């Protein structure tokens, strides 16, 4: 049976109530001319629920370690939300963004909608032909395709002009789902691992990473996930790999505005010597 979510607002803070439980969703914030929600900030009343590699090592092995530095850079909370920028809706410890067709957010939501509890949270969404549809009186209406997620973005966040009820409810549903179902948290992890596996295959084709240590490979994956390399990503990566200090050169890629993230990534990698001990194997399609 669908869970009933009710919105409560205190000043600029939005809460939701479900089954008698009250929990924080996000704070209204202006950003670049837009208005939306975010929930990771100093003193946030958000329920603490963080990604830690050791909790998932049994199911995902080394890949749980491999993605952890990026998770740290992204705040590592399974409940991270923002809905104020061009992505319209971003969620999860990897900050999966809804604006990318066939991207990580879309893949995560598809996997969630395949779960038994999906009708409790999104009774009006359904998978058909492997894609997300909205159930309407006229039938199924597609929300995403190979070229666009515009309809899905508007379903989750109708406009960037103000915080709407639909936006708060969509966020509350995903927060509640991730909080109360370990399987929903594993969906986030599985999505992140699949994305990073695809990054490795892509990097091996573009710049040949066969035999490269996992710490260098991780920085490449983080650059692709974050997008800070821009259109020059592959030339910059190739140049870094050919240098005498590839790890340092890879970490340096990106504009000065990302220096904080780069420092966080460097520190997280240094704290995990197991990353330098594994190497990418083209033949195995994995780290060995």
Image (tube, rainbow, N blue to C red):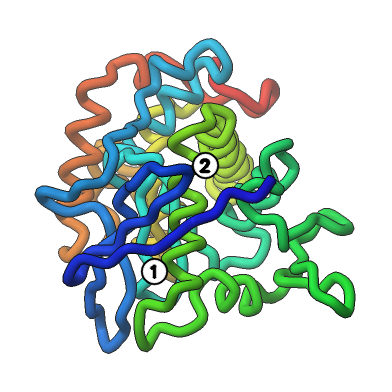
Camera-nearest residue between 78 and 207: 78
Q: Locate the N terminus and report the quarter of the image it occupies.
A: top right
For residue 10, above or below residue 222: below
What distance separates the C-alpha of mark 1 from that of mark 2?
Answer: 18 Å
Residue occupying the point 52% across, 42% down:
177
Camera-nearest residue between 26 and 216: 26
Residue that label 2 marks: 177
- Describe the element under mark 1 as helix, strand or loop: loop
Camera-nearest residue between 40 and 75: 40
Q: Earlier in the sequence, mark 1 or mark 2?
A: 1
- Describe the element under mark 2 as helix, strand or loop: helix
Residue occupying the point 58% across, 16% down:
59
Question: Can residue 31 be spotted in the picture?
Answer: yes
Left or right, 100 with reference to 247: right
Q: Residues within 10 Å of mark 1 (few under 14, many from 20)?
A: many
Residue occupying the point 67% across, 75% down:
148
Left or right, 169 with reference to 33: right
For residue 193, above or below residue 227: above
Q: Which mark is residue 83?
A: 1
Question: Hey, which residue is sitting farthest front in the picture?
Answer: 20
Left or right, 175 with reference to 11: right
Question: Can residue 238 be spotted in the picture?
Answer: no
- Measured as percent of width and height from the top left, residue 107 is found at 65, 51
- Measured as percent of width and height from the top left, residue 161 is found at 37, 88
Camera-nearest residue between 235 and 24: 24
Report the label total.
2
Q: Residues within 10 Å of mark 2 (few under 14, many from 20)?
A: many
Q: Locate the C terminus and report the quarter of the image it occupies.
A: top right
């Amino acid at each position: 049976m669908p869970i009933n979510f009710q919105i409560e607002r205190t000043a600029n803070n939005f809460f939701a109530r479900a089954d008698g439980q009250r929990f924080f969703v996000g704070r209204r914030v202006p950003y670049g001319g837009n208005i939306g929600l975010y929930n990771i900030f100093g003193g946030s009343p958000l329920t603490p629920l963080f990604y830690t590699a050791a909790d998932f090592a049994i199911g995902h092995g080394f890949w749980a370690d491999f993605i952890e530095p990026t998770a740290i850079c992204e705040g590592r909370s399974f409940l991270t939300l923002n809905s104020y920028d061009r992505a319209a809706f971003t969620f999860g410890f990897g900050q999966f963004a809804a604006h990318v067709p066939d991207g990580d957010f879309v893949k995560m939501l598809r996997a969630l909608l395949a779960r038994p509890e999906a009708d409790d949270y999104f009774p009006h969404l359904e998978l058909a032909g492997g894609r997300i549809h909205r159930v309407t009186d006229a039938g199924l209406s597609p929300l995403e395709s190979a070229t666009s997620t515009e309809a899905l973005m508007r379903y989750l966040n109708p406009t960037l002009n103000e915080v709407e009820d639909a936006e708060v409810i969509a966020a509350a549903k995903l927060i509640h789902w991730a909080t109360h179902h370990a399987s929903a948290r594993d969906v986030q992890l599985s999505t992140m691992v699949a994305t990073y596996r695809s990054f490795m295959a892509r990097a091996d084709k573009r710049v040949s990473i066969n035999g490269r240590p996992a710490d260098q490979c991780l920085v490449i994956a983080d650059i692709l996930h974050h997008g800070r390399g821009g259109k020059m990503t592959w030339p910059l990566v190739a140049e870094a790999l050919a240098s005498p200090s590839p790890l340092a050169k890879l970490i340096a890629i990106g504009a000065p505005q990302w220096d904080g993230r780069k420092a966080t990534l460097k520190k997280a990698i240094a704290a995990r010597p197991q990353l330098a001990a594994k190497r990418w194997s083209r033949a195995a399609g994995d780290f060995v």
